[in-house]
Amino acid sequence: MKTRVVIVGGGTAGWLTAGIIAAKHCAGKITENTLTQETEVILVESPDVKNLGVGEGTWPTMRDTLRQIGISERTFLSCCDASFKQASKFVDWSDGENEHYYHPFTAPVGYGAVNIAEHWSATAKDIDFESWVCAQGTICKQNLAPKTPQMPEYAFALNYGYHLNAGKFVKMLHQHCVDKLGVQYIQGHVEHVLPAENGDIASIVLVGGEHIEGDLFIDCSGFAAILIGQHYEIPFISKQHILFNDTALALQVDHASDEVPIASCTVASAQKSGWVWDISLQNRRGIGHVFSSDFTDDKQAEQALLKYVHNDPFLAKQKLSPRKIKFTPGHRETFWHKNCVAIGVSAGFVEPLEATALVLIEKSAEWISQQLPRERGAMTVLAKRFNLLTFQRWQEIIDFLKLHYVLTSRQDSEYWRAHQQLDSIPESLQDALSLWRTQAPGLYESNQRLELFSSASKQYVLYGMDFHTAREQCNLGGQEASMVKRLRNETLHTTEKLLSALPSNRQFLSGLKKV
């Protein structure tokens, strides 16, 4: 008996979900004479809905996703104007002239064997944490690639994700899923939903009368949330009292020339009532201002955004008209209800800090693919587990994003002062901060095997923003002292080696066009 998965909505969420499920359950299952598929994947997309188009930063998880669904990295980089992302760079999130720090994708040296943060805290606070434990920030400062052209696809010298053109990414996924993975594509607008006697969705009905039946329906319809929101009326839980930002103004700005550097990191520059994101692709940069409408208005936010753009000599001079995106930060009360599961914006949405949108799509689709229910009774059990895991992930995301704001020393606006008020800080984050004041984040403080943010990520943010972990001077024994010294020398040696060996992003990506 076949399992029919119906995905409502295209965009990045819909096509990534379709690709991940189809690659495991459909690809290679069709022969010339015999149809042996046990799973059908159908994607229904309305021609009236435009892609949100601002999710242009990924985590390193995207490398595994692309490889698993069978897309060549060279094809991806070329088709999607993509470039490498090795870190997030935070500018002016604390007081201080030219203040900035990096949250790289490469873990601190010795991670898993020793908590190097404790030794940095006790002995080397005259050197910034990231530079002391990792080469990647230095590589980002030089706009270098994370690999050489001779390395195989998806291999690396330093861990990396991507910056990509969201519109072109969707087109590439669409073609690959239909042509290579057997995903059935139907264009049409959902008019209404037909329920089964047990409350499941029996079928969706398109404008024109076509009925599409399914066993599992996945809602990737974005803010419209056609199935999880409109049909099932699952409540949306606002988190605006924690994460204040609710509006974004987005621009696409060309490079000033074909020779300007392509940044190796997403840049997040703090503003009076929000922050500006800056993502470098091969031919342009995606730049936007995300802010709280409670603390500023559209006009002031646009002025701050345009000032940022106009002050950058590496950007072309062109007429600019920002696109406004309004949102309520938060998530659904339940993500999998009956035989309907929400993935992407229909499940929840918060500001793009730390690029959590795409990774949550990947993780959710991967979980469903691995646990795809074959009968209705199994679906009830899996739904409970998925809901628990996804709710925990949303809590984790909200705490980690809030951490960036709580740690700031900025006092120049009501926006930043409000973020530090105790009633806006989740109790779970308050508990964590209390712990981290006495000991650095480590491997064993979390019992979540599938956590999104490791202790390494927490260390980079905490110590990048001058958080103080009270600690007596480390009394290192001979063996441990020797190991710390060796690890420190290893970082210095790795940095020097990579600086001399790695090409710039521009050089690497330009080389793709010559082959």
Image: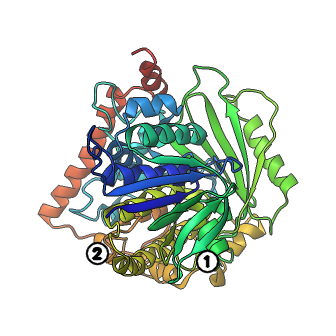
Q: Quadrant of the C terminus?
A: top left
- Percent coordinates x, y for residue 101 in the rendering: 51, 52
Q: In the figure, 319 relative to 7: above or below?
A: above
Q: In the figure, 498 relative to 174: above or below?
A: above
Query: Where on the picture, by quarter, is residue 233?
Result: bottom right
Outermost residue on the top side: it is 514
Under mark 2, the amino acid is Tyr
Answer left or right for 145 relative to 416: left
Image colouring? rainbow
* Secondary structure state at the residue bearing disc 2: helix
Residue 144 visible in rendering = no
Query: Where on the picture, by quarter, is residue 316?
Result: top right
Mark 1 or mark 2: which comes first in sequence?
1
The residue closer to the viewer here, 378 or 51, is: 378
- Percent coordinates x, y for residue 103 in the rendering: 46, 53
Q: Quadrant of the N terminus?
A: bottom left
Under mark 1, the amino acid is Tyr
- Percent coordinates x, y for residue 118 in the rendering: 32, 67
* Secondary structure state at the residue bearing disc 1: loop
The residue closer to the viewer here, 480 or 292, is: 292
- Residue 444 numbered mark, or none: 2
- Percent coordinates x, y for residue 123 in the rendering: 34, 61
Residue 55 visible in rendering = yes
Q: How dense is the environment of label 1, judged by Cα within 10 Å: few (below 14), some, or many (20 and up)?
A: some
Q: In the figure, 162 relative to 221: above or below?
A: above
Please name the residue that numbered disc 1 is placed on. Answer: 232
